[in-house]
Amino acid sequence: MKKLQTLIAAIFLSIMLAGPTFAQGKTHKIAVHVDQNNKKVMNMALNNVQNLTKYYTSKGDKVIVEVVAYGPGLHMLRADTSPVKDRIETMSLAMPSLKFSACGNTHRKMAAKSGKKVPLISEASKVPSGVVRLIGLQEQGYSYIKP
């Protein structure tokens, strides 16, 4: 009986020491960089997001993805010019841990150049700088992907 209690205590202790990753799998944090106004590149970025999410979740892991668009790539997140806005909407509904960040510097420059407001899709959040956001994500341990 004493051996059984010791074994149970050892198993319980190893589970407690392993923490939440023992039961939930690993968490993968990925930053995806889009800086081209090219539908193929935008779709490749979204394909990468879908494929890596499918792969890791099939292994029981958690996936957090942030797509950061700046420069000409901001068209990906513009409500008036995005060639992939319907796909982004569908993916956002299916993947709650998917986030889209729009560069505030680029957004401001595009609006000034056009002389009117530049609408962003509802799934996009504006950040002060796309480049600074990518650096910050990498400093937080995000893996960097550029399709």
Image (spheres, rainbow, N blue to C red):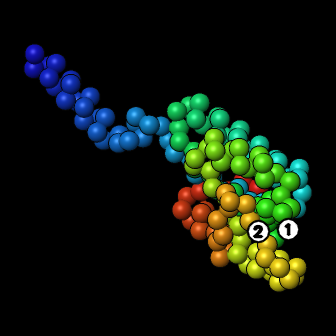
The picture quadrant where one finds residue 7 is: top left
Q: Secondary structure at mark 2?
A: loop
The amino acid beneath tag 2 is Pro
* Count of numbered circles on the image: 2
The amino acid beneath tag 1 is Pro
Q: Position of residue 82 (x, y in %)?
A: 83, 58
Q: Position of residue 64 (x, y in %)?
A: 58, 49
Q: Which residue is mark 1?
A: 72
Q: Tell me: 129 left or right of 39.
A: left
Q: Secondary structure at mark 1?
A: helix
Compared to residue 89, the image places residue 36 above or below, namely below
User: Which residue occupies 29% across, 35% down?
Assistant: 14
Q: Tell me: 111 left or right of 134.
A: right
Neighbours of disc 2 within 10 Å: few (<14), some (14-19), many (20+): few
User: Which residue occupies 82% across, 83% down?
Assistant: 112
Q: Position of residue 5 (x, y in %)?
A: 14, 23
The picture quadrant where one finds residue 103 is: bottom right
Q: Which residue is mark 2?
A: 119
> In this orientation, does residue 70 appear?
no
The nearer-to-camera label among 1 and 2 is 2
Q: Tell me: 129 left or right of 1.
A: right
Q: Tell me: 3 left or right of 109.
A: left
Q: Position of residue 13 (x, y in %)?
A: 24, 35
